Structure formats: structure tokens, C-alpha cells
Image: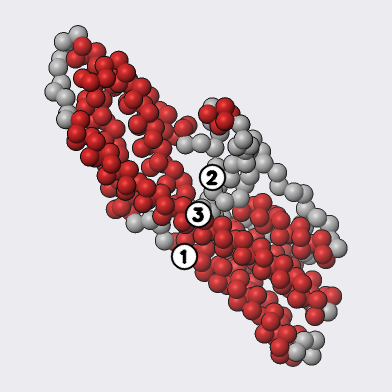
Amino acid sequence: MIIREKSNNLALLFMWRGTILPKVLPMVIILMCVSVVAWGLSHYQVYTVKSVPVIGFTVLGVVLSVFLSFRNNACYDRWWEGRKLWGALVANTRHLTRDSHFLSKDDRQAILVDMLIFVNLLKDRLRNQRLPADNFARYLNLCEQQKDDLNTLISTHLNAPQVMLERMQIRLMNAVKTGQISDMIYVSMQRHVVEMGSIQAGCDRIHSTPVPLPYSVLLHRAVFCFCWLLPFGVGGVLGLWTPLLVGLVAYLFLGLDELSKELEEPFGVAHNDLPLDAMTRLMERETLALLGCQLPPVIVPRHYYLS
């Protein structure tokens, strides 16, 4: 995610990093060059291309704007739902941390460590990563045997986060059997484990179900054709102003198309994806601080990018 100051209008106007401009600029420049060539051929009567009726561009532009708006809203809803799910996960870890005081010190630490492992494994699952347990084990005071078991789990199990939830559930059941907590307290604490499973299911739903491909391809082709025909539709009316108008319109339509593709997958590592690393580190620091353990460093933005 890009973290930048938005109060400076001049800085917003010339902002580069984290925007869509670097991705669409090559195509915009090509279209502006095509506009210059098309105007030059017509102006110097080297070759005259019959102008496309402007009314056709007006109608097509309105239709494209409507459909691009629908697609961007759908993609933003996916992005925002992902953010709400991870916000609920942050809140859930805090609730479980408070309720876990009913357990003994060792059992409380064990279940909270399992909770942090679950968060890390869920993040890696959503990013299609299989990172070794050493990436987070050094902050959780895990022994070599525990790290080896985790690495085996990561490399072999189909749904590693689910295994951690089962382990937490078993710890709670054992606490009931040994008389540490009552049935009512068990139900209260078990509700947080169930909620974490629901959050994972919601994230998996977004991650495994993209916007239907035919819909995306149809809009992408329509935008591409519109932008390439535009120089021949407005060249006879605008003259030398044609490249500027074509560049602005192409930046708008191509930018909206590219932005929707970036927001469609909110759990990746693109500039505008959710900062899962930072949110995971926040949960680690809050939980480990309450356990009296050494805290990992805060993840800060690098070149305005927060991972």
C-alpha cells in the first residue's frame, strides 16, 4: 500500500510512484504519436483517412464509462472486503488475548503463539507463498523441533492455517478436561477460533474467485479499440490539439482498466494491495508485548510503499 501525504495538491499532480501512470504511459505515448502521424498525413495530403463519426465516439465513450465504473466498483468492493476481514482478524486476536487469561501461563502462551503462527500462515497462503517458519519463528521463541515441525506442515499440508486452528481448539478442549476453564468460558473462547476460521474462509473466497474473465477481456478489448480509433475520429476537428486530447482520454480509460486489475487481487504485493506484512507485524507486537517477550521491529514504508 502506498502511504503518502495527500494535502499537497501540487505533489499529487506530479506523483509517480504508486500511481497507474507508469503502467499506462508507454501506450499513451504510442497513441499520441499515432495521433501526430495521422494528423500529419491528412494535413499535408499525403494520405487522407476518412474520419470516424464523432457521435460514435460519444456514445461508445459513455457506454465504456458506465461499464468501467461498474467493474471498478466491483474490484474496489473486493479490496475493501479484504481490508474488513483483516481488520476483523486484528480485533479477534485482541479479544482472544484478553480472554486467554483464564488459562495457565504456559497454556496461554502456547495458544497465543499458535494464533500468531496462524496469522502468518494465512498471509502466506493468500500470497501463494511457502515461506519457511524461520521468517517468524525467531520472534516466537520456538525451539528447533517446533520449527522443523512447522516447516514440514508448511511444505506438506494442503491448508496449514486450518491445522493451527485445530491445534488451538484442541488446547481449549484439554483445558476444559483438566478443569482450567468451565464449559461457558470454553464456548466464549472457542467463538474466537470459529471467527478466525470464518475470516480465512472469506479471504479464500476473494483469493480464489476473481472477476469473471470474459467480462474483464470484453472491457479491455473495448477500451483498447476505442483508444486506437480515437485519433482518426477527432483529428479532423482538433488538428494539432489531437495528441493532447487523445493522451488525456487514453490515460483515463487505460488507467481505469489497469486500476481495476490491480484492485481485483487485494492480497498481493503490488503497490496498492493490502499491507498484510504490516498488519501481521502489528498483531505480533501487540500479542508479544502482553506476553512480555521481545518485540520484532515495526515495518515502516520504504519509498512510500508499505508491504
Q: Judge by depth and name the residue closer to the eye, 16 or 268.
A: 16
Compared to residue 116, the image places residue 106 above or below, namely below
Callout 1–callout 2 Cβ contact below 8 Å: no
* Residue at horizontal 21 percent and vertical 11 percent from the top: 43
Q: Which amino acid does label 3 sit on?
A: Trp
Numbered circle sitting on residue 138? none
Q: What element carries label 2?
A: loop
Callout 1–callout 3 Cβ contact below 8 Å: no
Q: Judge by depth and name the residue closer to the eye, 156 or 21.
A: 21
Q: What residue type is labelled 1?
A: Arg
Per the image, the residue denoted by label 2 is: 272
Q: Can residue 100 be seen from the camera position used here?
A: yes
Q: In this view, does 237 lie to the left or right of 120?
A: left
Relative image position of residue 162 (x, y in whole percent): 58, 72
Q: In this view, does 15 lie to the left or right of 254?
A: right
The residues bearing labels 1 and 3 have C-alpha atoms spaced at a distance of: 12 Å
Quadrant in the rendering for residue 173: bottom right
Q: What element carries label 1?
A: helix
Q: What element carries label 3?
A: helix
- Mark 1, other Cα within 10 Å: few <14 / some 14–19 / many ≥20: few
Q: Which of marks 1 and 2 is nearer the N terminus?
A: 1
- Mark 2, other Cα within 10 Å: few <14 / some 14–19 / many ≥20: many
Relative image position of residue 15 (x, y in whole percent): 55, 30
Q: Judge by depth and name the residue closer to the eye, 138 or 169.
A: 169
Q: Can residue 170 be seen from the camera position used here?
A: no
Per the image, the residue denoted by label 3 is: 79
Q: Nearer the viewer, mark 1 or mark 2?
A: 2
What scheme was used to colour the molecule? secondary structure
Q: In this view, does 92 lie to the left or right of 138?
A: left
Numbered circle sitting on residue 205? 1
